[in-house]
Amino acid sequence: MTKIIIRPLDITRNYDPADLEVSITREKAEDGSSIVKKFRLTNKNFIPNADLQPNDTIRLTYKGIDQLISLADNPRYTHVIDPAQLANSDHTITLIIHPPENSELNPVSIESDVNVNLKSFGFKEPLEIRLTPTSGGQTKDQALWDTINSHKLDFKHYSNFIDEVLRFEGPGGKGRAYFNSGSPTAGSKKDKLSESQQMKLADSMRLPFNRTEAYSLLKFATERYVEHVYSLARFADEYSSNEDSFDLNDYLGKDKIIPYYDLIKAKIKEYFIRTGAESGYLKGNADANLIELIWNYWHEEGKVSQTMNALARRFQNIKNGYKDPLLNFALDPLRPLNHILWGYIQDQQHRLTATRKNYEYTSEYDLAVLGNVKPGFNPADRRSKFLQSFHRLIHEATEYFVQSDNTTIRPDGFKLLNALRDTHRILAEGAHNQFGDLPTVARIETLIEQWILSRPEVREFLGGRIMVPYEEPWMDRVDSMKALQGWDNTSISFYRDLAVNGEKIILGIRYGNWTNVSSRDHATNWADAFRDAIQRYIHSYYTVTGIDLSAPTVNINPEVSALLPGLHIYRRLNREKQRFSRRY
């Protein structure tokens, strides 16, 4: 195998590696036919393995135009290189590019990977020809899409981590090491602090209430876990380099900052000057967290927080309505969940209220959980065009998928690119004030609620349908509570799919550098990367609201695309109740 390295003669000339193409032509002596193989640069400036043989000829084109090339040890430039003198099996060829001076050169396009004189072959069986879907050229932001798409909080991993933390016995236990390090994978490492220092650290983080030690440890361990798991910088540190594709470090650059944040950083560069004056908490923070508040919104629409609130009220002996279905809930003090629920209720004043989260939903997405809207709700700022723009983007993505599956045409990605730019700008307008902290805090609080609901004590009381498969152990408790209370009868599984896949889609929109890209390849690569998430979001949205985001009417009817999902859910529930009352 031969490694081909390509180096421009003029280093000031900016070549895009995705537009360089190397063609290797091989003449077959027995029948006079020729075979042309073409390669594109898969990474940086070289082709790792090219099968070269003597008498092959090498040609280099840039954007379809022939380039003058020469070997590194030969100053003569030509359009074609003959590597016949290289007879060994392992060697490296360095090609020097020189832009052609003849401006009248016509572009040369190769329509097929193989150009063979078929008449010279005697085929005894039918020749099979396959058409493959076209895809965009390789772009650096694909590494970010892969990171977002592969990132998924494994609730089982989080639950095991919390269980290990809460099992520790004494200051030297394993859970203390977890809590001290803040890393979900550091439980087996030696403690960094002494025993007295660990005790002092734990005391400083304890809630200011009596008998809340267990919940305090649960709360702060979850905070450390979220800070570690959702940091994009952590993915850059752990990303393994791959010669065949761009990796995350290529996209982030030496400062490990996404290009979108780097663009904003230039406006406030005085906060990022590396001096002693701006350090610690006074230093600017350009690290991106893979957290979107829409994850909390859909879980709240699915009644996760409402289920936890109902349990907490009954724990305090507060009746829920005239006929409270939780009257028989009695959790004895011998079970460990009793003490954690006590701490959870004591800490209520420190948690985000439903109204405060509604204000932030409105600020970022113009969404609100209608059941939690209080009289006097009056947001100062709202993203009134987000839903219409986001649903238009989803519709354009489905149109692109239809065209992409048709292998006889090349799909149009410019509509998709324009929709991405519009939605990105709307999201950027809402990324202020509480955006930096509230989504992370909301994620921590919801994870704690899910862990409490996943405990066997809650399952023992609420019950559930054992034969129904759920992705996470807390989900059947929510569906059981919804059935007891007469809430929305759509399974929590669909709300969870909306939360997980909606977060992936919006993260790709928010953190992409859509302002500075003009090639449709960026948009088509984004759609290809998130195709599964988009399709599952469309299906779950239809199941929950009854609205098909892939239908053409969504793109032209603002009555459909701009209404709150909660309003669709409310109307659908009322229609089902009316049909049930008429039938029985």
Image (cartoon, rainbow, N blue to C red):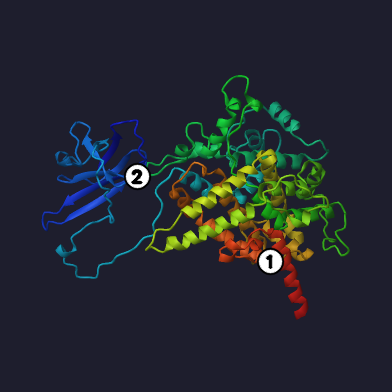
- In percent of the image, x 25 and y 67: which residue is there? 127
Residue 403 spot, x, y in % from top left = 44, 62
How many marks overall? 2
Residue 510 spot, x, y in % from top left = 57, 45
Q: Is residue 55 left or right of residue 327?
A: left
* 374 versus 230 height, above or below: below
Task: Provide the residue designation for mark 2.
Answer: 19
Query: Does label 2 or label 1 sit earlier along the sequence?
Result: 2
Question: What's the CA distance linking mark 2 and mark 1?
Answer: 56 Å
Front label number (2 vs 1): 2
Type of residue at label 1? Arg
Given residues 571 and 327, the one toward you in this image is 571
Given residues 380 and 285, the one toward you in this image is 380
Residue 387 marker: none
Q: For the view shown, which residue lies furthest in the left direction?
A: 30
Type of residue at label 2? Asp
Residue at disc 1, secondary structure: loop
Task: Provide the residue designation for mark 1.
Answer: 465
* 71 versus 367 height, above or below: above
Badge 2, how many Cα within 10 Å: few under 14, some, many 20+? some
Residue 331 in view, yes or no: yes
Given residues 202 and 290, the one toward you in this image is 290
- In percent of the image, x 43 and y 45: which residue is there? 139
